[in-house]
Amino acid sequence: MRRLVDGHLTGPDFARAWLAARRDLLHGGERVREPFERALSEVFYLLDDYPIDPALRSPGDTTDEQLHQGVRDALAKLADLER
């Protein structure tokens, strides 16, 4: 998530990596507690409406800017949990 926000990953690269990692963790039985899960779910829902192929984007789909902002927001929520 930080690599996306810091500009080291494109939106499509982040989407592929994040979704693959989440799938692997869920299949492996990994579970997290609230509110950590809530922050991760918000990213998941953004990606659910984010076409990885820009040619397939339609009005109303998550934009790169919305994805970046949503991930920044999730990181801020996760940082607040550490305090």
Image (cartoon, rainbow, N blue to C red):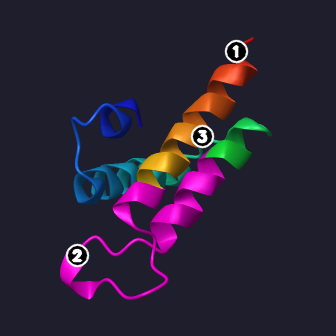
- Is 37 one of the magenta-colored residues? no
Q: Is residue 20 left or right of residue 38?
A: left
Residue 53 visible in the displayed image = yes
The residue beneath circle 3 is 74
The residue beneath circle 1 is 82
The residue beneath circle 2 is 54
Q: In which quadrant is the C terminus drawn? A: top right
- Circle 3: residue type: Ala
Provide the secondary structure element on which disc 2 rests. helix
Q: In which quadrant is the N terminus drawn? A: top left
Q: Position of residue 28 (x, y in %)?
A: 51, 46
15 or 5: nearer the viewer: 5
- Lower position in the chain sequence, tag 2 or tag 1: 2
Quadrant of residue 54 within the rendered picture: bottom left
- Magenta segment boundaries in residue numbering: 40-66
Query: Which residue is drawn at the image coordinates 39% and 50% (left, top)?
Result: 18
21 or 28: nearer the viewer: 21
- Lower position in the chain sequence, tag 3 or tag 2: 2
Query: Which residue is drawn at the image coordinates 32% and 83% (left, top)?
Result: 57
Query: Which residue is drawn at the image coordinates 70% and 36% (left, top)?
Result: 36
Q: Mark 3 touching mark 2, by CB under 8 A?
A: no
- Circle 1: residue type: Glu
